[in-house]
Image (cartoon, rainbow, N blue to C red):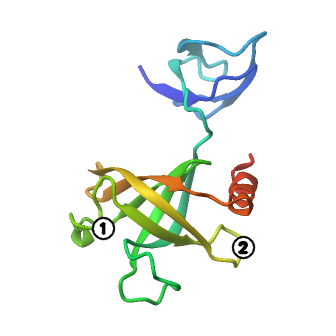
């Protein structure tokens, strides 16, 4: 059975994984468990899985630069590596990068990174520190790091929150 993942809410937009039709599903209270759903458009059954993360995570494709060197001031420094932020939330992000450029010394759990990127539609470089929480190979044979942001300043939290608004 196909599945779709949504955030629990009173009003949920549920896309059919078979035909793409988007349903607006309203209940008196947010659901507490996954549930079966039937598409009114194509009549297919599918499972609605609840995303129970504490924070909304947005899928993105943002080029980024990162390094374990904390004294780097710009992205032209030769110690900088490149990757793509593939998802982001108020508390962290996922960075995907080439398996060929993987360094077990730099990209390992517990290391602190300095990360640079620009939000789409903006020019200012966003610079943040993050701790690597996980490193693994993706099904597409790339590497991905899970990053927890560290010590976000208030203006950084605000910029991030504005970007994450639906």
- Report the residue marked by disc 2: 122
x and y percentages locating residue 39 in the rendered image:
61, 19
Which residue is at 53% across, 73% downward?
116
Is 6 situated above or below 145? above
In the displayed structure, does residue 157 sit left or right of residue 18? right
User: Which is more toward the observer, 5 or 159?
Assistant: 159
User: Is the residue 78 above or below the residue 10 in the image?
Assistant: below
Instruction: Answer few, some or many: residues within 10 Å of disc 2's Cα (few below 14, many 20 plus, some between 14 and 19).
Output: few
Q: Nearer the viewer, residue 52 or 105?
A: 105
Mark 1: which secondary structure?
A: loop
Q: Residue at x 22, y 66 (%)?
A: 105
In this picture, residue 113 sits left or right of residue 21 = left
Residue at x 62%, y 40% (from the top left corner) = 56
Label 1 belongs to which residue? 98
Residue at 73% across / 60% down in the picture?
159
Q: Position of residue 93 (x, y in %)?
A: 50, 53
Residue 137 seen anywhere in this rendered image of the structure? no
Residue 72 placement (x, y as % from top left): 46, 82
Indicate the position of residue 164 as horizontal and vertical percent values: 69, 50
Q: Earlier in the sequence, mark 1 or mark 2?
A: 1
Which disc, if any, is residue 80? none
């Amino acid at each position: 059975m196909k599945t779709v993942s949504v955030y629990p809410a009173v009003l949920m937009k549920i896309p059919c994984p078979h035909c793409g039709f988007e349903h607006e599903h309203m209940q008196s209270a947010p659901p507490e468990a996954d549930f079966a759903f039937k598409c009114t458009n194509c009549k297919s059954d599918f499972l609605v899985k609840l995303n129970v993360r504490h924070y909304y995570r947005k899928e993105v494709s943002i080029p980024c630069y990162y390094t374990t060197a904390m004294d780097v001031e710009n992205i032209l420094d030769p110690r900088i590596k490149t990757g793509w932020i593939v998802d982001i939330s108020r508390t962290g992000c996922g960075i995907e990068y080439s398996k060929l450029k993987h360094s077990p010394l730099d990209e390992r759990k517990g290391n602190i990174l300095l990360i640079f990127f620009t939000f789409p539609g903006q020019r200012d470089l966003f610079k943040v520190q993050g701790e690597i929480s996980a490193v693994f190979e993706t099904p597409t044979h790339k590497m991905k790091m899970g990053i927890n942001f560290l010590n976000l300043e208030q203006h950084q939290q605000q910029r991030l929150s504005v970007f994450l608004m639906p």
